[in-house]
Amino acid sequence: MSSFCVETEHLMKKYSRNIQDPAVINDLSISIGKGEFSVVMGNSGSGKSTLLYLLSGLDFPSSGKIWINDIPVHNRSQKELALMRRSMIGFVFQENNLIPNLTIRENILVAGYLVQGNRKRVNENADTLMKQLGILALHDRFPTQVSSGELQRASIARAMINNPLILFADEPTGNLNSEASNNVLECFSNLNRNGQTIVMVTHDLKSALMGSQILFLKDGAIPADHSLCIDRHRPGGEDFLFNWLKQKGW
Amino acid sequence: MTLLTGLSIALATLLFSTGLMILKSIQEPFDDLFNRLNASHILMLYDVNDHSTKDLERWFARQPETERVSQGSPYFLCTGPLLHKGNKMELMVQLTEFNNDHTVQDKLMVIDGILKEGPEHGEIWLPKYLANDYHIQIGDTIGIPGPGGLYSVLVSATIADPHYGSGMVNPTRAWLASGELPFFVPATQLSHTMLGIRLKNLDSTSVLWERFTRNFTFTGDNLTYSLFKNAYLGIYQIMGNVILIFSIIALLIALFMVRTAITKAVYDDYKLIGVYKTLGATPMNIVSLYVLQYSLLVLLFVPVGLGGTFYVIRLLLSSISQKLGAYETLGHSQQYIYVTSFIVISVLVIITAFLGSKKAAKIEPVQAIRVGAPLKRFSKILLPRNMEASGLALPVMMGLRLLSASFGRSLSQGIIILITLFIIVFSINVSFSFESLKYNKPAWGFEDGDIQFNRRDNVIIGLTHVQLMEILLHEKAIHQIMPSSYASLSILSKDDLPVIEIYGKVYSDSLSHAGLLNLEGKHPQTSEEISLCIGTARQFRKKPGDSITVFIEGQKATFLVTGIYQDVSNLGQGFRLHQNALKKLNPLYSPTIYSIKLKPHNNVDEYKNYLVKRLGETIAIDASIEERVEQMGIISEMKASLFALSFFFVLIMLLAMGSDLIISTKENLKHFGILKSIGWTPAQIRQSMVCKILCITGVALFLAIPMNLYLSPMLMGNITGGIGLINFPFIINYSGLLMTVPITLLLIAGFSWCLSRGASLINPRILIVS
């Protein structure tokens, strides 16, 4: 068994059928190790979100291969992908994407009940998660009745309810103020500390510094020198990262 | 969505204009034939020993209302079975002589056979329906049992007969050459004559008849235009009323769909409307955008509905024409109804579009551009509120949430399903009630007998009533014998003038033994008592306990009304007497009709054959009511029309459901994307949509069946009240009801499963796009 949680090989994604139009993801081969907190960065239109959607099985590649925990993702049917997503993958969107006519707690349970037959245990897990993320008091409120930071934490709880192998996050702090943003990042950091593999797309340097490696995506590919292992406790890390990104054309 | 709305408009138009057309225009082929053949509006049948034809002719000819009086045509009432290819035709026929006057009044139109003025010696002309029912071909031989033995005649033509062509008037009529009757009927028995009076104006019938009864004590029978017309068109009147009532519901559904579609469109176009307004569009400009769209929809789909009506009416007309034997199918008032329907439906749709789009006119441009459409509020009223406490499967729970998310639309959807189920259950039970006539005869006004026959007087060695009863009472298979006879009486006004002549029945035993029922009061028992049919009782405002003065058996008599009953056989007119009453007036009275109820486990057909074998020509077996109804195709036509009505409503329901599913998919696009992203399979998402519809259907089923069982008898009572059935004999078809539940659920589940495919194809990428 490989030590990688996610691997891709010659991954390609094109939205246009015109051969001359460039690919959004172009011949990308990457490996993300288990327990890593990888941060995907890049300029607008570089293909960050597309990469995340391909890796998480929410979208289909035009060509190439993807494995999650050695299980191929690229040749799965809609139903098989759904079954994989519910048990192996968690996803946190930039917008919380909670279902407005379900309470915070129900939004979490609706994902948990999909996998686990024992509803009592799911309820307990949901309570534990909500407590960990500081939203237990909001359990019976509807998404329109809580703040955006709290919603994002609820999204994380929903993504984590089935103990996924890997958690994908697409600019999870993009719509949050700094306090809410810090809270959310703190959650990610705690999860990673407990061994959770995380792949996060972000524009924010502070968020990026929470990760263990940076993958800089350029025109749909990650050239050889465009990945960086970082030490989040290193003094002046933000400046260092800023300069590194500048060099890569950020 | 637009297509579905358009189709619902087309279907509502179809039903509405078909209902109107049946009620207003379908009579035209009958009237057309009646006028072309210069048919008599009043047909008098009498014994020349009682009335002088010359006197009657002269009197009627002098009346200002009379257009023409025909010559008297002798006829012989043949009660015995006619023979065709060795088979007995169990029906009574008035064998009528054709004369030269029939080339001017009461003309006959030859449909099949050699075209000539009238039948020649040795030939017979039959109504088209009779030839169809008994598969009689031109050139076949018919044996007529006469007092002198069997007389054979050749069928040389089938004809259109406006008086007797429907098959609903019993006895029926066939035509022989002038002077033919004496060949097989002794002159002493040839005393019956038919005289026709054609009026200038139909409305003068009652005035003329009232004047006639003041001058003559008429003891014969008179048949009028309305009776003949009802015989042809009564069933279509019922169908027309049913369709028109339900078409209004269909129209309301279509208008609801228009309103829903506009609301949805306004919601979708919210920002765009804001932009239009900033560019200077007035509220009226915005409203006109939607009104114009729906005007176009009306222009496209109302003609489609009217085209459907044209086709349906042609089918109905061809069915009537087949009975009439005429091929003129286009009525003059059809264009008028098409135009009326077009205007009514168009105006209603445009008004609905106008009212629906007024919301768009009120949109504030700044808010629309900056914020977009206001967020929809979700209703929290539906269970399960507490998901964790509920043991329901996830798709069911999500289905319920989808339902509550758009509660108003779900409620409307439920009402449409409820109406459709109501109509389906209504159709099943009403059809079954008609089919069950033979098991439920008393409720329709008939005796509860298995076999009915006439005792024949005009045979060489006949049986008296006493002799026949003696024989029948020894029959082990017979459970009950109910002797009776037909009678007529004239109801007298306060001035002792006859107002109307009605036909009824006189029973020789307790009426309860015949299974007869009353709506109120009790059966007549003594010589002073009478019960009245509901139509007669209502016309003369009589109720049990009142008295009524009549002219019967040549005498004036006053009876106490003891009961009111219903009877479908004579359009609500009639009376019932015990033989005590008639014997008091005519001591020689003896019954001629015998209704027999067999003991259980006896085969009716076998016993009929046995009776004919045993009693020979002394009796003539009548076709049973169920056989007559079946011959006339009433049940099949009623079933076909109810089936068509249900079918149209199922279509409307599916269209409404389709439009709801499409709107629901659009509204929940993002939610379905979220569910997919957290691992819901496409099938689970579809299941949740199907569950939502099934929940609505379940509630609709739960309400529709009891509602139907309660309301249908009342509804049918109102519809059939005009033909003498105010308490419709409603019978519940339990097996049909049981079948309805799974079939409806399966149909709706299958349909919504197919239409929910759109939801399963949603790509979670929309979560980035949005």
Image (cartoon, coloured by chain):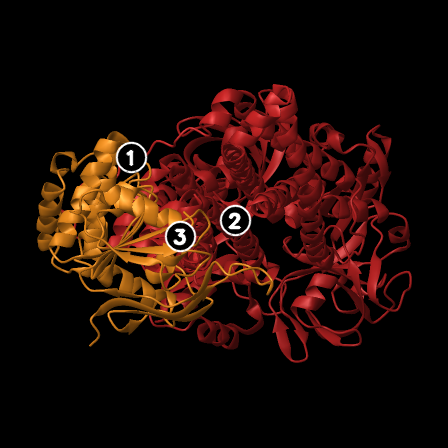
Q: Residues within 10 Å of mark 3 (few under 14, many from 20)?
A: some
Q: Horizontally, is B64 left or right of B217 in the view?
A: right
Residue depicted at 91% across the width and 54% down the height: B100
Q: Residues within 10 Å of mark 2 (few under 14, many from 20)?
A: many
Chain B, hue in figure:
red
- Judge by depth and name the residue closer to the eye, A227 or B706: A227
Chain A, hue in figure:
orange
Q: Which residue is mark 3?
A: A248
Kind of residue at badge 2: Leu
- Judge by depth and name the residue closer to the eye, B576 or B54: B576
C-alpha gap between disc 2 and disc 1: 44 Å
Chain-order first, disc 1 or disc 3: 1
Quadrant housing the C terminus of chain B? top left
- State the image coordinates of residue B523 (x, y, percent, origin top left): 38, 41
C-alpha gap between disc 3 and disc 2: 58 Å
Residue A176, numbered label = 1
Residue depicted at 75% across the width and 29% down the height: B204
Quadrant housing the N terminus of chain B? top right
Residue depicted at 62% across the width and 40% down the height: B16
Badge 3 sits on which subunit?
A
Measured along the vertical axis of the image, is residue B12 above or below residue B95? above
Residue B655, numbered label = 2
